């Protein structure tokens, strides 16, 4: 978040948390679930010149923007982007996956890229993944980054029609993420706890399908071959999220990288090579 926005927001939460806490709670929840920007880099725009676009119909909403590269007869790799990103954040993965004989499918989440909407919660992100898979059918593998990785974990509690999962810089601890958010905006601990309680009630219809609270939704025993990759220098989603998930999913392969951060990890040749190699290995 830009520094020129931080000071007014910090002042706002400092005052409202003490004077009108219910205003602070609702404002913090809204800010946490509303992406402030979602831009494509020029290189990401170029890949859209060679894509098949298709709408993904949603009930009571405008369709999601869907994208397909490659032949429809080939096995599907479904790419799930993270917060304030778009489908094309995986731009460097597309050609290597096509060369391996896969078709690549992705979509812009609600309020991101070319999809409409204003805000979206963590479990609604998982709902979208379930919906997309219902529309496109079986996929060979899901590759999720950041919040997309976390949503994949949450959605897996309902079981998913996929052979493999790759999670890059995944969220697995929403409490820790909200506390990091609170620290950045100087939101008191009591207020952010109330934000989580308020959000659970607000999104209960969606969230209750996956668990009993914000931590429980990440508890899953969906045992398919899984690869988890996280960078030690990730400033957006702390590496403990990846480590925590690797401990929980003891059947997963786990790789730690260095000096790649949260977003550059998607551009790294070693990471891309590890993912494509893992996806091409026979399913056992």
Image (cartoon, rainbow, N blue to C red):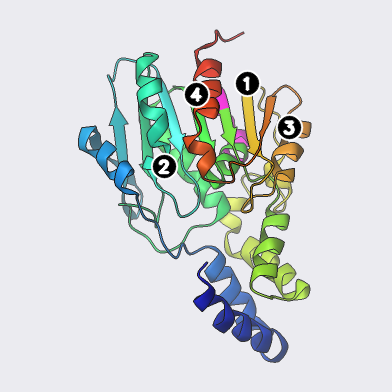
Dot 1 or dot 4: first in sequence order is 4
Judging by the rendered image, the residue that carries numbered circle 2 is 89
Instruction: Give whichever of 227, 62 is nearer the camera.
Output: 227
Instruction: Determine the secondary structure under disc 2.
Output: helix
- 84 displayed left or right of 217: left
Mark 1–mark 3 Cα distance, whole angstroms, equals 13 Å
User: Which dot, 3 or 4, sits closer to the camera?
Assistant: 3
**Which quadrant: the C terminus?**
top right
- What residue is at 70 percent from the left and 69 percent from the top? 183
Mark 2 or mark 4, which has the lower sequence index?
2
Residue 278 marker:
none
Q: Please name whichever residue, 224 or 281, is drawn nearer the observer in this view of the structure.
A: 281
- Res 46 seen here: yes
Mark 1 or mark 2, earlier in chain: 2
Marker disc for residue 246? 3
**In the rendered structure, does residue 174 fall within the stretch colored magenta?**
no
The image shows residue 71 at horizontal and vertical percentages of: 27, 19
Give the numbered dot on residue 141: 4
| Residue at x 31%, y 40% (from the top left corner) | 66
Q: CA gap, disc 3 to disc 2? A: 24 Å
Quarter of the image where one finds residue 271: top right
The reply to whether the magenta stretch includes residue 163 is yes
């Amino acid at each position: 978040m830009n520094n020129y926005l931080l000071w007014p927001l910090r002042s706002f939460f400092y005052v409202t948390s003490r004077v009108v806490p219910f205003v602070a709670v609702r404002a913090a929840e809204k800010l946490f679930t509303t992406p402030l920007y979602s831009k494509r880099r020029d290189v990401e725009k170029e890949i859209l010149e060679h894509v098949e676009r298709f709408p993904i119909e949603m009930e009571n909403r405008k369709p999601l923007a869907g994208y397909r590269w490659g032949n429809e007869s080939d096995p599907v790799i479904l790419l799930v982007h993270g917060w304030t990103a778009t489908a094309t954040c995986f731009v460097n993965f597309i050609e290597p996956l096509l060369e391996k004989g896969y078709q690549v499918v992705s979509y812009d989440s609600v309020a991101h890229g070319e999809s409409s909407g204003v805000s979206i919660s963590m479990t609604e992100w998982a709902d979208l993944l379930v919906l997309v898979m219902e529309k496109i059918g079986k996929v060979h593998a899901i590759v999720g980054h950041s919040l997309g990785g976390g949503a994949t974990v949450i959605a897996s509690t309902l079981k998913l029609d996929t052979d493999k999962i790759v999670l890059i810089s995944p969220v697995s601890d929403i409490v820790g993420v909200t506390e990091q958010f609170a620290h950045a905006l100087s939101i008191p601990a009591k207020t952010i706890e109330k934000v989580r309680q308020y959000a659970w009630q607000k999104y209960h219809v969606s969230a209750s399908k996956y668990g009993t609270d914000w931590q429980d939704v990440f508890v899953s025993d969906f045992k398919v071959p899984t690869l988890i990759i996280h960078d030690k220098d990730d400033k957006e989603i702390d590496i403990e999220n990846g480590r925590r998930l690797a401990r929980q999913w003891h059947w997963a392969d786990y790789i730690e990288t260095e000096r790649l951060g949260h977003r550059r990890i998607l551009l790294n040749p070693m990471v891309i090579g590890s993912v494509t190699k893992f996806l091409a290995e026979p399913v056992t």
